[in-house]
Amino acid sequence: MKNIFQEEKSGILALLEKIVNQDSGSFNKDGCDAVGNILIEEYKQLGFNVEILQEIQNGNHLYITHQQAIDPDILIIAHMDTVFPDGTAAARPFTITDDQIAKGPGVFDMKASQVQALYTLKSLIQENHPVYKKVAILLNSDEEIGSITSRHYIEKYAAKAKAVLIIEPARGKQLTTSRKGGGKYYLSIKGKSSHAGAAPEKGISAIGELGHKIIKLHELNHHDGVNVNVGVISGGTSPNTIAPNAECKIDIRFETQAQGEWLDYSVREILSYSDIEGTQIKLTGGITRPAWKADTASMKLFDLIRKEGTKLNLELEPIYSGGGSDGNFTGNLGIPTIDGLGPIGGNAHQDTEFLLLESLETKGLLLINTLKALNDIPSFKS
């Protein structure tokens, strides 16, 4: 069998360099759309139709099926956005080290996965394997900020699928079969400024109020299966002024939906009143991703992929992740879902992010073989 990842390596690397060197932070609509436009042209050359799901503020999303598609029932999901601000690509562009490690913003999370998916489909078309007619690809531009605008598309198209393959990058031989649910909140507190030395009694400290709330929020961590983290705080104007304002960002994680509902209620209850009289509290946000617990159908899908991995000398293992992805949405709906099918690397969201280039081939071949095997499976729920 032809190995497209070896025979077309130069084209693969050229495309990877092109999209890595295009900034596409979640709030950079032009950048995300530029990456999307590059991929649109690539898919159209292979005979795919691309439906552009228009967004006003965030980047557009793309739903891709072949012109010969017949009721596609395998859904591949990947995101085009990154966490990096504008200018990052110019500051540290795509590079390859002597030991075949690729670097650059988003190279691991998850622009290499975009290239993997494209060349996987290209290989299947060149081989004339009919499964390419059964595959749909959904590329979104807001995964890093919770898939706020793309969630309904994810759930809509996943509802038609017998299997969902999330090609988030991997850190080794593990595939993700379950993930914690999560939520994000923004807390804003208003107090009253006053001189800290001359008239402290006339002030109402927003920072003091925030301090009370942080302690109470973190006390929720004493309960099993949940995590609360106040990760960003700000406030005040000067050391000698009673703080008139304070803000913080809160992250929550939970293992089950019941825990998520309890945790969301508890956060809101703690922030529903003032500990310091006269402060005003405003809370926005909530649960952004449901918990995903592997069911029998998803584990059947994992077993199929593991068997295909064995043929490639990949000993794959299921893992439970505390991080979220678009797999939370599809897995929570009961649709057989496996995550972490992308290439291998590390240090996501950091300047030291890296990709092991050899894994682009290995995981690409795994994806090709998985799709072929799925072609003969009518359902995982029987």
Image (cartoon, rainbow, N blue to C red):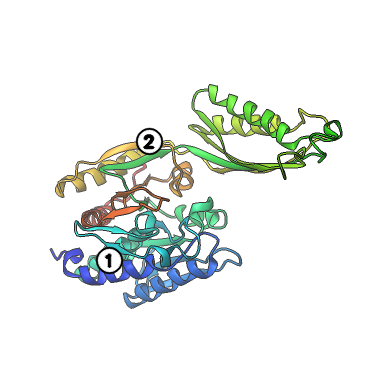
Q: Position of residue 248 (x, y in %)?
A: 64, 41
From this view, report whether residue 128 is shown above or below residue 309: below
Tag 2: Cα neighbours inside 10 Å, few (<14), some, or many (≥20)? some
Measured Cα–Cα span from mark 1 to mark 2 = 28 Å
Count of marks, rendered view = 2
Residue for badge 2: 320
Q: Nearer the viewer, residue 57 or 90?
A: 90
Q: Is residue 199 left or right of residue 71?
A: right
Q: Is residue 161 left or right of residue 364?
A: right
Quarter of the image for residue 262 reads top right
Amino acid marked by disc 1: Tyr
Determine the secondary structure under disc 1.
helix
Q: Nearer the viewer, residue 104 or 12?
A: 104
Residue name at image x 57 percent, y 53 percent: 148
Q: Which mark is residue 119?
A: 1
Residue name at image x 35 percent, y 71 percent: 18
Q: Is residue 332 left or right of residue 76?
A: right
Q: Position of residue 217 (x, y in %)?
A: 62, 29
Q: Which mark is residue 28?
A: none
Q: Position of residue 89 (x, y in %)?
A: 42, 65
- Direction left: furthest residue: 1
Residue name at image x 20 percent, y 41 percent: 315
Quarter of the image for residue 97 reads bottom left
Determine the secondary structure under disc 2.
strand
Q: Is residue 187 visible?
A: no
Amino acid marked by disc 2: Tyr
Tag 1: Cα neighbours inside 10 Å, few (<14), some, or many (≥20)? many
Q: Is residue 234 left or right of residue 161?
A: right
Q: Nearer the viewer, residue 242 or 46?
A: 242
